């Protein structure tokens, strides 16, 4: 399950990057170089902008939610046994410090 969620997280992040690059900025930016300037001809300028904005919001929300789920439930190395062993190992008895013996006169 952990591997599936990590793979899904990587795919969502790649799609999010692509959707952000395709969006046309005020200076046309990277969208013009990658063919994003012609995407308005498919849906219309207004509908394209709405579609890309909603897609960005949905992908960003999914990215955050899946990252939280991974960190809270599936992060490897987070077991209660490890925490208990750390606590027990710090409670070792240390002998009290001894005063140095005085030198004979």
Image (tube, rainbow, N blue to C red):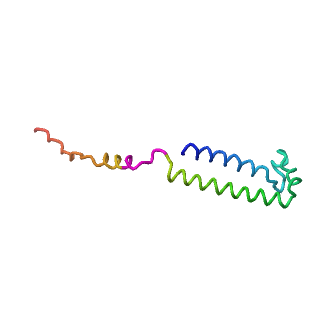
Q: Quadrant of residue 11?
A: top right
The residue positioned 50% from the left and 47% from the top of the image is: 75
The residue positioned 54% from the left and 45% from the top of the image is: 2
Residue 78 lies in the magenta stretch:
yes
The quarter of the picture where the C terminus appears is top left
Left or right placement of residue 74 versus residue 27 in this view = left
Left or right placement of residue 59 versus residue 35 in this view = left
Which range is magenta? 76-83
Left or right placement of residue 64 versus residue 26 in this view = left
Q: In this orientation, which residue lies closer to the viewer: 43 or 57?
A: 43
Residue 59 location (% of width, % of height):
68, 54
Residue 15 location (% of width, % of height):
71, 48
- The extreme right residue here reads 41
Residue 37 lies in the magenta stretch:
no
Q: In this orientation, which residue lies closer to the viewer: 92 or 72?
A: 72
Residue 14 location (% of width, % of height):
69, 46
Left or right placement of residue 93 versus residue 70 in this view = left
- The extreme left residue here reads 105
How many dots with numbers? Answer: 0
Residue 76 location (% of width, % of height):
48, 45
The residue positioned 14% from the left and 41% from the top of the image is: 102
The quarter of the picture where the N terminus appears is top right
- The extreme front residue here reads 1
The residue positioned 87% from the left and 50% from the top of the image is: 38
């Amino acid at each position: 399950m952990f591997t599936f969620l990590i793979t899904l997280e990587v795919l969502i992040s790649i799609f999010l990057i692509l959707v952000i690059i395709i969006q046309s900025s005020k200076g046309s930016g990277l969208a013009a170089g990658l063919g994003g300037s012609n995407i308005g001809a498919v849906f219309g300028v207004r509908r394209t902008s709405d579609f890309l904005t909603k897609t960005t919001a949905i992908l960003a929300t999914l990215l955050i939610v899946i990252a939280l789920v991974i960190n809270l439930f599936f992060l490897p190395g987070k077991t209660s046994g490890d925490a208990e062993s750390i606590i027990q190992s710090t409670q070792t008895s240390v002998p009290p410090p001894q005063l140095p013996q005085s030198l004979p006169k």
